[in-house]
Each structure stands twice: as structure tokens, then as C-alpha cells.
Image: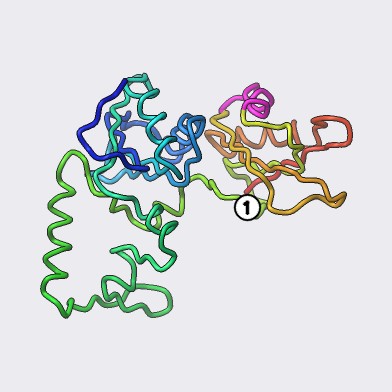
Amino acid sequence: MSSSSNQPNTTLYINNLNEKINKEELRSQLYALFTTYGKVIDVVASKSQKMRGQAFLVFTDLAGATSAMRACEGMIFYDKPLHIDYAKTKSWATSKREDPDFVPPTSVHANGLVRTNGRPDEKKRPRDGDEADDRKSKREKADDDDEEMEIDEDDEDNAPSTSNTVPTSIQQPSARLLCTNLPQEVTDDVLSVLFQQYQGFTSTHVSQSPTPNEAGERVKFAQAIFESPELATVAKDALNGFTLKKGWVMSVAFY
């Protein structure tokens, strides 16, 4: 059982992670491991120098975060024991859930960035000197072992989707597969049994589809992650059209 010197938080700070693991694979595997203890709404990891070997996991509630911390502290993950603690600060994902008007401190609205055609062209100086001091203080604090959760926005966009929005399928090969028309009985474990027989399988994430099928029945969809587009293609070709149960034919596409 893990003890923490920080205040209980829905966000967990994890360090001592294997730095050789691909960022996308690391996020997927952390999500797959921790989602069994509660609903995970964000996984933040970066290969930047100051964030190597570290990650943040954001749960919807404190019970899930606490259960995960107690169960997984010291667990061997990619040949290294996990070190887990409550994060020192509330995550941006949590702040956004609690306050829809919340603006992250690195957003265009908070740092005075002027954009032209979607690109940052010029940075204005803060009108209030205190604001500049605050940002400097945060950067200095981020040098500590337990860092602030200040990750580039494009990093967050690449995290595994944990929402109920069905991704858009694409034609070109990808390491990610989208599985649709899944019955309610399908879980991560059930789908993993199908996909793990193919080389390069990493994880599956099953979610409730926001819309019913043509028959008006509730359906699920899933994301299956592989190590490369080539390995994902083999699984896609084999399982597209697979009958999960009578009347339920799974569709598999790249996304």
C-alpha cells in the first residue's frame, strides 16, 4: 500500500518509467493498465528532456485514483517498478470538467499570443508584471522531481481517445484500428483475446457508441493499437467482418 505526502488528487503523478518506450505505446499501455481501477479521462506523457520517465493520469474521481495508486505502486511496468503519488496540482482536464470556462495557462487567451492563419507570430508582454513572475515561478517549480502538468497542447491531442466520440476512419494504413458494430457484451478483455493472436498487438479500448445502430440497438466501438501500420494491417485483414455473435459482424478500419 502506497503512502503519499501530497493531498489526495484525481490526478496521479508517475515516475521511474522506462524511457526507451515509444510515447504513443506508453500512453496506450498506461491507459490500459489504470482504466481497470476507474475512468481515465487523460494520459499526459512527453519525450521532452524534463518529462522523460514521467507521466500524469487523470481520473474522473478520487476513489479511482486512490485505488489505482494503491494497487499499482511498485508494479513492474516495462522492467521497472512504478513510483506513484498524487500530483501536487489539479490537472487541466479536471479543471475543464469543473469549469467549462477554464483557460489553460499556455493557451492563446492566457499568454497573449497573437495568431495569424492559425500560427503563433508574436508574443505580447504581459501588462501586469505579476503575471510574468507567476509564469517564471511555474517554470522553476517544474524543475522539481514532481513536475507541474505543463505539457504542449499537441502532446495532449495525441493521447489515446477516452471519450465516446467515434474516430473517423481513414484509408491509409495506420497502427490504430477502429472496430465498430460491437454488441454490449464486448469488453477490453474479450476483444484482446481476438487481437492478441496477431503480432505487434498493444491494447484495446472499448467505449459506448453515442448513437444506436440501424436496428435501434445500443452498440459499442473500440480502438485497437498495434506497434506499426504493417502489423495492424495483418489484423485488420483477418478480423474485418468477423462475427462476434449471431447477427453482429464487426467492421475494422484504420483511423
2 is higher (above) or lower (below) than 135: above
Q: Residue 159 location in percent, x, y?
A: 46, 47
Residue 2 falls left or right of residue 141: right
135 is higher (above) or lower (below) than 90: below
Residue appearing at x 16%, y 80% in the figure:
127
Element class at badge 1: loop
Question: Depth check: 53 or 220 in front?
Answer: 220
Q: Which residues are magenta?
A: 189-200
118 is higher (above) or lower (below) than 233: below
153 is higher (above) or lower (below) than 73: below
Residue 46 falls left or right of residue 25: left
Residue appearing at x 40%, y 44% in the figure:
58
Q: Residue 84 location in percent, x, y?
A: 30, 30
User: What's under tag 1, amino acid-wise?
Assistant: Pro
Residue count near mark 1 (Cα–Cα under 10 Å), binned few <14, some 14–19, many ≥20: some
User: Across the whole image, how many numbered discs are drawn on residues?
Assistant: 1
Assess whether residue 141 is covered by the magenta stretch.
Answer: no
Q: Residue 109 location in percent, x, y?
A: 33, 73
Chosen colour scheme: rainbow
Q: Residue 72 falls in which quadrant of the image?
A: top left
Q: Residue 51 location in percent, x, y?
A: 26, 43
Residue 197 falls left or right of residue 84: right
Question: Depth check: 170 or 96 in front?
Answer: 96
Assess whether residue 199 is covered by the magenta stretch.
Answer: yes
Residue appearing at x 33%, y 45% in the figure:
46
Q: Quadrant of the N terminus?
A: top left
Q: Which residue is mark 1?
A: 167
Question: Depth check: 52 or 70 in front?
Answer: 70
Residue 30 falls left or right of residue 79: right
Residue appearing at x 31%, y 50% in the figure:
90
